[in-house]
Amino acid sequence: MTQGGGVAAPIGGQIFREVLPYLDIQKDAQVEENIVETVEVPNIVGLNVIEANKKLKELELKINISNEPEEYDKETTIIKVQVPNAGIKVNKNSNIFVEI
């Protein structure tokens, strides 16, 4: 006695192999919407805000100054607390938190 899946699976597989290429669907195709690009966070501690912002923009990251006073000089140096740390991989368009 055979199971129904033992008979149906090979036939179903053959049908899909013939129909999917006709529908222009590739085997093991990934949906582009679900692919998230990641980048490695650079070390920006010790840079001024202008330099750090430029470096992050090149990688499509955003700077977020945690202790931002109402007025500060763009030449102000980032002194500590880079989160996430340098070397960590993050999704593009992520925020990098720092203190000046």
Image (cartoon, rainbow, N blue to C red):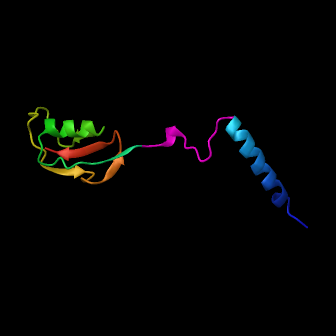
Residue 59 appears at what percent x and percent y?
A: 28, 40
Magenta residues span 23-36
Q: Is residue 63 left or right of residue 79?
A: right
* Quarter of the picture holding the N terminus: bottom right
Q: Residue at x 84, y 57 (%)?
A: 7
Q: Quadrant of residue 73?
A: top left
Q: Is residue 53 above or below residue 9?
A: above
Q: Is residue 90 above or below residue 22?
A: below
Residue 36 appears at what percent x and percent y?
A: 43, 43
Residue 33 appears at what percent x and percent y?
A: 50, 38
Q: How many marks?
A: 0
Q: Residue at x 55, y 40 (%)?
A: 31
Q: Is residue 5 left or right of residue 72?
A: right
Q: Residue at x 77, y 45 (%)?
A: 15
Front in this rendered view, residue 81 or 94? 94
* Quarter of the picture holding the C terminus: top left
Q: Residue at x 85, y 59 (%)?
A: 4
Specify whether residue 30 is painted magenta: yes
Residue 63 appears at what percent x and percent y?
A: 24, 39
